[in-house]
Image (spheres, rainbow, N blue to C red):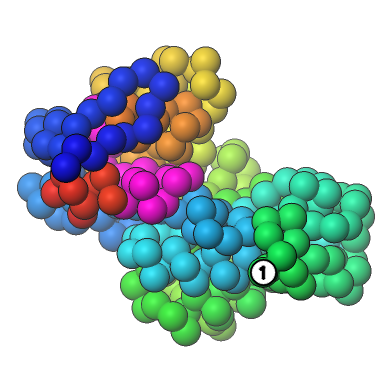
Amino acid sequence: MRVIVRSGRRLLGRGALTGLLAASAVIGTTAGTASAGTGQVFVVAHRGDTDDDPESTLPAFEDAIDAGADGIEFDVRYTRNGTAVAMHDATVGSTTNCTGSVASLTFTKLEKCDAGSWFGPAFAGTKVPTVNHSLLYIAKRSSTVKVFLHIKTKLTQSQANNLMKTVKADGMAGQVIFVVENDPNGHKLHNAGVPHDDLARMVHSAADWQRDYAILVPYGDADDTGLVTRALVAAAVSAGKLVLPVQGEPASLTQIITDGANGVYVNDLHAAMATLTADGLR
């Protein structure tokens, strides 16, 4: 049976990805990638299992674990009264039946919003989860899956301290990776006690590849053709970093593996897992 990788540029059949990855070194990191030579790709479910569930909700997190993802990513924003919640957009209109920005709503108001009906009637009444509730929910279902908290706001030192306290209180120390867009947030989290190896940096430009983080997440528009190149990926992987380009932003799964990345943020979890498994990369 021929396994196809979705790509706007080309298609690869079974065996092609295996040969491509074999040419690159897969470096083990504290984020949980396989040790060198095993040929395994570290898979992060971007916003959970969005194939089957509304994004960034508890059902999406549970199904991502069941599907075998190594990590689950969701975004962190703050409500008006300072509650950290899982929400990608700054506004709530695209994924709930409410309107307004996350920052303008109290959590009391936000928790009354329906975050599931837009996806399908079976999910009516699904709530926007807090970060604390999300971590507790995931911890009960897996002691190994990594949770990538993508910080989407400018943190105060107090907020950074409280995030780390939450992680520790939930028994998730060492299981949570903090993903930042800028160095000030990284510094605040490090000051709060987050180890260097548990900090990841979003990569939006060639210069960002040089940042001193254990994990790099290249992400940009589809026309950012120079953002993920074999040379940049190889240098980062050789330095012991975990490189997690986002499937489709800007690279397809095909391009990600071709370029030698040792991990991937997947937007189409089941198709990606099937392809990687068929090619011996899982």
Query: Which residue is at 57% across, 70% downward?
Result: 59
Residue tagged 1: 122
**Is residue 68 among what the camera can see?**
yes
Residue type of the residue flagged with mark 1: Ala
264 inside magenta stretch: yes
Name the outermost residue toward the front: 1
- Tell me the quarter of the image containing the N terminus: top left
Give whichever of 138, 54 is nearer the camera: 54
In the drawing, does residue 106 fall left or right of residue 12?
right
Q: Please, is residue 30 above or below residue 264 in the view?
A: below
In the drawing, does residue 231 fall left or right of residue 222?
left
Query: Which residue is at 40% across, 60% downward?
Result: 71
**Is residue 199 among what the camera can see?**
no
Q: Please, is residue 140 above or below residue 32 in the view?
A: below
In the drawing, does residue 18 fall left or right of residue 103?
left
Give whichever of 157, 89 is nearer the camera: 89
Instruction: Indicate the position of residue 75 as horizontal and vertical percent values.
Output: 62, 54
Which residues lie in the magenta part? 257-273
Give whichever of 121, 279 is nearer the camera: 121
How many numbered dots are placed on residues in this image? Answer: 1
Query: Which residue is at 18% across, 48% downward?
Result: 278
Q: Please, is residue 128 above or below residue 265 in the view?
A: below
- Tell me the quarter of the image containing the C terminus: bottom left
116 inside magenta stretch: no
Crowding around mark 1 (Cα neighbors within 10 Å: few <14, some 14 to 19, many 20+) is few
Q: Quadrant of residue 32?
A: bottom left
Give whichever of 191, 60 is nearer the camera: 60
Instruction: Indicate the position of residue 26 as horizontal and vertical percent values.
Output: 17, 44
Query: Which residue is at 31% across, 35% downward?
Result: 5
